[in-house]
Each structure stands twice: as C-alpha cells, then as structure tokens.
C-alpha cells in the first residue's frame, strides 16, 4: 500500500505502508511529487518498481488523476511478450480503457482521465463499480517481472507510460471481492 498524496516527502511516499521495509518502491525514473497531487509524471517515461511479482490471484487498485491521452499508455502493471501480464492502460488510441490480466485485455469504450481503478482476474472496476468482466482462468506466470507503478514494464524493460498524477495504490495477493473493492475505492476516493 502506497500513499504519495499527503506523504511527508517523496522518500516517504515510496514506503509500503502495510509493511514498511517489504516491497518499498525503488526508482526506475522518478516522478516529481507534492503532498497535494502525489506522484506527478508530467512527461511519460516515469516508473517505480514494487518488487512484487503478481500471479493469478493478484488485485491492484490505484487512484490517479489528470491522465493525458496517448497512443498507448500504461498507468501501472507489467506486460510480457504476447500481451501476457497484469496491466492497466488508460486513454489508449481510440479512447479505451483496458484492463489486462493474463492474456485478456477487456476494454471499455471510453477512456478515463482519473478516478479509482481496480482489477483482478474477475473484473475491472472504476470508482468501486464493475466496469468490465475479465474472466481470466489459468495460472499466470510472471517469471521474475515485478509490477511497476506509473509506468509499464515490458519484458522487464521500460516500455510505455502515461502523463498522470497518482495519489494512492495498493497490491493484494488475493482476489478481492466486489464488496471489498467498493470499500477500498471509497477510502481511496476520500483521501
């Protein structure tokens, strides 16, 4: 769990609040930061590495704002060859929001410029409500590739990100229920 919004400074924003010292973020290319906006990626190419390797039970939730449309831009996650991985793509070409999970990339028809996004193997959620079904079955092998925040890793190298601000994010090693996601989304929105 990370909360750059309201953190004491940028270094404090990298600390895993759920278990400090475990899965603290490391910097790929640092965003800027302020207490009101959180992490600020004013240009693409920013990314923070979690060290957490996802699997088929992973749930990710992130609150962001001021997302700028791009041909392809990832808020967070990790993609591997063949579009396998866990990744949230917002405002891609055509105005879609994509919730990648495994080899599935369900999408909704309108790109989002901010809000609370959550997804796992069952569905993608926007502001606590189901946005699109994912329905991934199988075993997701991420290898050694950890999940990145702000940017997207592609075969463990930087690939693509969006211009945006991130206020909070959390990774879970379990598939959260719709009730849990609704409560978490409300808590993040209230920050």
Image (cartoon, rainbow, N blue to C red):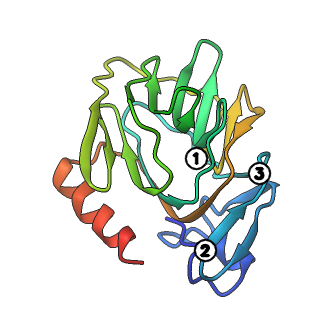
* Vertical arrangement, residue 99 with respect to residue 29, above or below: above
- Seen at 58% across and 59% down, the residue is 66
Residue bearing the label numbered 1: 52
- Seen at 65% across and 33% down, the residue is 145
Judged left or right of residue 42, residue 69 is: left
Say whether marks 3 and 1 touch (CB < 8 Å): no
- Looking at marks 2 and 1 on the same chain, the residue that comes earlier in the sequence is marked by 2
Q: Quadrant of residue 9?
A: bottom right
Between circles 3 and 1, the one closer to the viewer is 3
- Looking at marks 3 and 1 on the same chain, the residue that comes earlier in the sequence is marked by 3
In terms of secondary structure, where does tag 2 sit?
Answer: loop
Q: Quadrant of residue 45?
A: top right
Q: In the image, residue 155 lies at what x, y percent? A: 72, 25
Residue bearing the label numbered 2: 37
- Seen at 65% across and 51% down, the residue is 150
In terms of secondary structure, where does tag 1 sit?
Answer: loop
- Seen at 76% across and 59% down, the residue is 42
Q: In the image, residue 94 lies at what x, y percent? A: 53, 26
In the image shown, does 14 or 105 lie closer to the viewer?
105
Q: In the image, residue 75 lies at what x, y percent? A: 59, 46
Q: Which mark is residue 46?
A: 3
Q: In the image, residue 69 lies at what x, y percent? A: 61, 42
| The residue positioned farthest toward the bottom in the image shown | 8
């Amino acid at each position: 769990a990370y909360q750059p919004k309201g953190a004491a400074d940028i270094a404090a924003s990298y600390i895993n609040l759920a278990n400090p010292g475990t899965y603290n973020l490391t910097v790929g290319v640092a965003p800027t930061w302020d207490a009101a906006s959180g992490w600020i990626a004013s240009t693409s190419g920013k990314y923070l590495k979690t060290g957490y390797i996802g699997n088929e039970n992973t749930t990710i939730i992130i609150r962001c704002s001021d997302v700028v449309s791009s041909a392809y831009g990832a808020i967070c996650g990790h993609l591997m060859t063949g579009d396998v991985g866990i990744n949230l793509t917002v405002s891609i070409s055509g105005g879609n929001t994509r919730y990648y999970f495994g080899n599935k990339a369900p999408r909704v028809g309108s790109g989002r410029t901010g809000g609370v996004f959550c997804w796992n193997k069952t569905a993608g959620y926007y502001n606590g409500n189901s946005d699109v079904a994912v329905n991934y079955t199988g075993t997701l092998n991420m290898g050694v590739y950890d999940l990145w925040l702000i940017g997207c890793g592609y075969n463990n190298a930087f690939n693509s990100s969006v211009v945006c601000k991130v206020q909070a994010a959390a990774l879970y090693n379990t598939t959260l229920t719709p009730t849990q996601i609704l409560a978490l989304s409300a808590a993040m929105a209230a920050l």
